[in-house]
Amino acid sequence: GRALLAVPGVASVGQVIGRASLSEDPWGAERSELLIQLDPDADAARVTASLREAVATVGGFAFDLKQFLNERIEETLEGTGAALVVRLRGAELPALEQAARVVSARLSGIPGAVGVHAPGALATPGVVVRPRRADALRLGVPLAAVERALRATLGGVPVGHIGYDEHQADVVLRLAAPVNADPTRLARLPLPTASGRPVPLGALADVTLAPIRTQLTHEDGVRTLVVRLDASGRPLEAV
C-alpha cells in the first residue's frame, strides 16, 4: 500500500482484507483488493503504467489493475476480468495444476503478456487433518464425530440468539485463540469415545501445516483450471 501511495497521481489507497460472514465476494484469505483513488488532474494512463511497475517488484503475488466498474462488468459477463483466458480441463487435479504452471511460465515469456497467473493453481498455507482409520476404530471414535468436533472448533457452536430492534443474531461460542494456525494445539482437541473417556485428536489423526488448494473449479462436470493474462505494449492480436 505504501509503495502505491508513493506513485505520483495517487490520492489514497485502501485495502480490503478477509471476508465478512455475509460478504458478496466469495473469495478466500489468499485474495485481497486495493482500492486506489487518483488525483482529479492525474493522467490515468501514466499512473496505471507506474502502478504496474510498482507492483511488479512485489514477489509472490499476482496483481490485476482494473477500473472498479470494468471489473464488475467483466466478472459478471465473462467470469474473469482478463483479456485472454486459457482453459485447461482434465480428470487428474495434480496433473492439471502442473500443466497450469507450465502454461503460465511459457505465456509469461511472450512479449506484451502481463498479469499471467492461474488462480485455481494457487495454494495457501493451512492445517491438514488426516484421520488414521485403524486408530479411530481402535479407540472407538467415529469419523463423523471427528468432523463435527472440527467444525465446532473452527467455525464455532451456536448456543442461542440475541434480538435487537427488529433484528436477530446468533450467539456463537468459539475458542479464545485461533487454532487453525497451530497444529500442535489443534492436535490436543478432545474427542469423545465409545467408552466415555476423551482422547486427543492427535491420537487418531495426523495434524500438519501444509499448502491447501484455494478453489476447485468445474465446468460441465469436468475439473477446469484457468490461466489468465492481459496485454500491455502490444496489440492483443499480436500477443
Image (cartoon, rainbow, N blue to C red):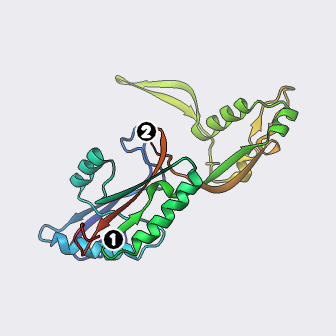
Task: Report the front residue among 55 and 21.
Answer: 55
Q: Can you give x and y, in whole percent of width and height, for residue 167 in the image?
A: 37, 25
- Residue pointed to by mark 2: 220
Instruction: Give the Cα separation between the discs numbered 1 and 2.
Output: 29 Å
Screen quadrant of the C terminus: bottom left
Question: Considering only order in the chain, which callout, 2 or 1, is on the residue closer to the N terminus?
Answer: 1
Q: Can you give x and y, in whole percent of width and height, for residue 231 in the image?
A: 28, 68
Judged from the image, the secondary structure of the residue bearing numbered disc 2 is: loop
Q: Can you give x and y, in whole percent of width and height, for residue 80 in the image?
A: 33, 52
> Along the horizontal axis of the image, is 43 left or right of 185?
left
Residue at x-position 21% and y-position 52%: 69
Task: Report the front residue among 4 and 108.
Answer: 108
Judged from the image, the secondary structure of the residue bearing numbered disc 1 is: strand
User: Is 170 drawn above or below residue 37 in the view shown?
Assistant: above
- Residue pointed to by mark 1: 113
- Residue type, numbered disc 2: Asp
